Image: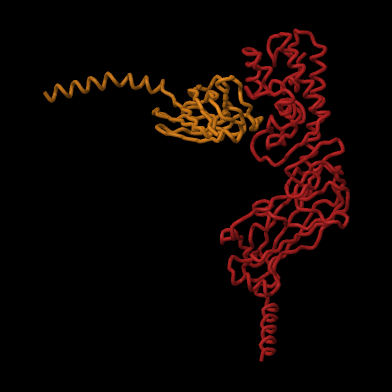
Chain colours: A red, B orange
Amino acid sequence: MSKILNLSVVALASSLMSYGALADGIAAKLQMSQNSYNDAQDVMVTVTLTNEEHVPVKVLKWYTAAEGVEESLFKVSADGEQRKYLGAHYKRQAPTHKDYIKLKAGESVSYDVELSSLYDMSATANYEISYNVSSLQLFSPNPGQAKKLARLGIEGIHSDSASFYLEGREFKGGNNKGKPGTGDGGGTTPDGISFTGRCSNSQQSDILAGLAAAKNMAADANQHLATASSSSVRYSTWFGDYNSSRWNTVSTNFSKIESALNDEPLTFDCSCKKQYFAYVYPTQPYKIYMCSAFWSAPITGTDSKGGTIIHETSHFNVVAGTDDVVYGQSGAQSLADTDPAQAIQNADSHEYFAENTPNLN
Amino acid sequence: MLTLLRTTLLFLIMMLLPVKDTLATMQRPTCQLAANSLGHLTFTLDNQTEQIWSLLTWQTPFDAWFSEFITIRHQQTNQKITYQGALAKRAAINADDYLTLPAHSHHVIQLDLSQVYNLSEGHYDVSLISLRLLPHNADLSQPSQEDDFIFVDCPSTQMNIVK
């Protein structure tokens, strides 16, 4: 009797499979526009999810990129070695109807995803990626249906793999390399520059270009302060009337800025999404948090990437301990006119002196 | 008798009207600070005027903790307590950086100072940077110069930290 029952269960299951009420569900396809990347290029992939059923299917959007990547959606390997997901994992409540997106029969959705900020791609290697998600709650907010799918062994969306070659930045074993549990996903360059907060390839490259500009600006500022006469227009524009003690303070500040940029272990974080250029905790050298205005700033000139790094470095209490007394060029110029003692404490005044745009002697 | 009362009332109202107008244009929002023994600071902003004001939220309690807008000094030593929060470099001011204060509105915000100040037991003076406000007719989409703002100072307060 029990044998007959077992057989009929098998028969029922195979009939469900063959009719495929929800058999294969969603097909995933990956597309990449190039098959070789350098260390300054972001690794963009287009994910297309298609409902290949003849009935509508609901998919839990946490496992799509509908609202950005909020779970590990890919399997990534470099020369055959699996790469850890560095992005966010969310602790959530059980999904409700509004957490699902509905795909009609035959309907497709596509998402563009940048991978170098989500997986460690610092190594030069051949990379292989595939879309690979599984969850018992993936397809329906209806627990009955979830159980049915589980019985049928349908628990995920998987794509074929795509491969590409990437010339990586080759991080050394620094503080942040592969640090488990931080979700930072950083690494340390051979020059001792660390990245945290999921900096993509292009963001790392922007930061390094900004840093190189900042070093040049700091060297130029020091050169000017060491050689210019006390009637320097560049000095008086940003720091006010000449006075030897204030001039010396500014000189000390810039020599400390320059040595911090060249000799200290700097860390740049890319997790800030605010409209700022950047921010720091003055009591926590030498970590700088880059925000959205930084990425669109020019490398040199007024309010540039280089100048922003000068500004932020000047804030550290162990460097110059500057404040934000006023913001902006016109504010900084009036401060120089009216209150030179405050101007030499102001971060933007240091930045504008270093950027020297327009060029003053 | 009734007519006389009416005339007097009318006269009084007419006398008061211009005064009220002048007061309204001179009036501006006011603010207050109060700190408790745990280091919680309550910031109250009152717009008791007849008009809408816009507050630039940079360097105010609405900006915690991305700028240093509070000064805390130990009363005995006059030593300034180090701010441990963040300092942000900002792009130009835009409309989102303002908080609208409707006429007759009241805004309260509470900050836990121990998040960014190391406060040991003792008496402190707590003061705030001047608030920067624009009257209701200002164009918030245009970059504002320091000269455009109307500054409002909050009276400083005392704080007695008990551990």
**Residue A141 point in image, percent of width and height:** 59, 65
**Residue A217 point in image, percent of width and height:** 79, 23
Quarter of the rendering containing residue A349: top right
Quarter of the rendering containing residue A236: top right
Answer left or right for A188 relative to A9.
right
Quarter of the rendering containing residue A191: top right
Quadrant the N terminus of chain B occupies:
top left
Which residue is more in the foreground, A313 or A352?
Answer: A313
- Residue extending farthest to the bottom is A1
| Image: A51 above or below A194 | below
Quadrant the C terminus of chain B occupies:
top right
**Residue A54 point in image, percent of width and height:** 65, 71
Q: Is residue B152 visible?
A: no
| Image: A177 above or below B102 | below
* Identity of the residue drawn at 81% across and 54% down: A83
**Residue A341 point in image, percent of width and height:** 66, 14
Count the labels in the image: 0
* Identity of the residue drawn at 24% across and 20% down: B12
Q: Is residue A176 visible?
A: yes
Answer left or right for B23 relative to A122.
left
Which residue is more in the foreground, A321 or B62?
Answer: A321
Answer left or right for A146 relative to A132.
left
* Identity of the residue drawn at 75% across and 10% down: A232
* Identity of the residue drawn at 71% across and 34% down: A294
Which residue is more in the foreground, A313 or A236?
Answer: A313
